[in-house]
Image (cartoon, rainbow, N blue to C red):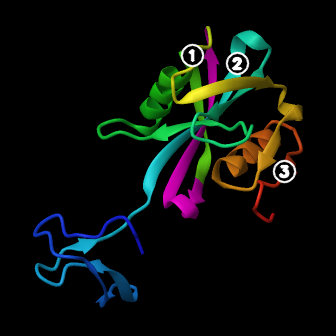
Amino acid sequence: MDKVFRFCPQCATALQPISEQEDSGAKTRLRCPACGYTHWNNPTPVLAAVIELADRDGQLLLARNAAWTGRMFGLVTGFMEAGESPQEGVAREVGEETSLAVDSLEIIGAYDFRRMNQVIIAYHAVARGEIVLSPELVEYRLFRPEAVRCWRAGTGYALADWLTAHGHTPQWMDLPGRAG
């Protein structure tokens, strides 16, 4: 259950976990006992990019988010915005976060990230230009594809799928405090 969404946006009554019959059987969801509003708690679409630098001999750009502890580097990600396609959104995110221009996009796949209630739509982005990071990112590194290590979570699986599709065997690492 969503711990953050606690009150009905229609009448401000406290939401309660209430079980009701739905198409697939009984489901417990946060519902308003006063007006019947249901908080569906649908996953949020997140866009991710495996950024290959066309003007740097095919190296991959991984970045470190300012909010992350430690020295972990990952894919550039961001939320899809209303009114844009996933392709428009991932190109926008790459531009906003790195100042790179996207030359081409190819979908890698969709991945669940249940811990954050997100669905990640991952793309391979071939990009070029001078790298200038947004304030959300504090550092980046360039990697040869064969030197990248994948993490066992949403975007790590996308990176592993991209590596496999491009003839590389993914190397895995475990995130601190998490088992395989």
* Residue at the image point whose x is 72% and y is 41% from the top: 70
Q: Earlier in the sequence, mark 2 or mark 3?
A: 2
Percent coordinates x, y for residue 165 in the rendering = 78, 41
Give the quadrant of the C terminus: bottom right
Q: Which residues are magenta?
A: 111-129
Give the amino acid at mark 3: Met
- What is the spatial separation of the Cα atoms under label 3 and label 1, in whole angstroms? 28 Å
Q: Earlier in the sequence, mark 3 or mark 1?
A: 1
- What is the spatial separation of the Cα atoms under label 2 and label 1, in whole angstroms? 9 Å
**For residue 106, what is the image quadrant?**
top right
Residue that badge 2 annotates: 53
Give the amino acid at mark 2: Leu
Residue nearest the observer in this picture, 89 or 98: 98
Q: Is residue 52 magenta?
A: no
Secondary structure of residue under mark 3: strand
**For residue 104, what is the image quadrant?**
top right
2 or 3: mark nearer the eye: 3
Number of numbered tags placed on the structure image: 3
Residue that badge 3 annotates: 173
Q: Is residue 157 left or right of residue 111?
A: right
Say which mark, if any, is on residue 100.
1
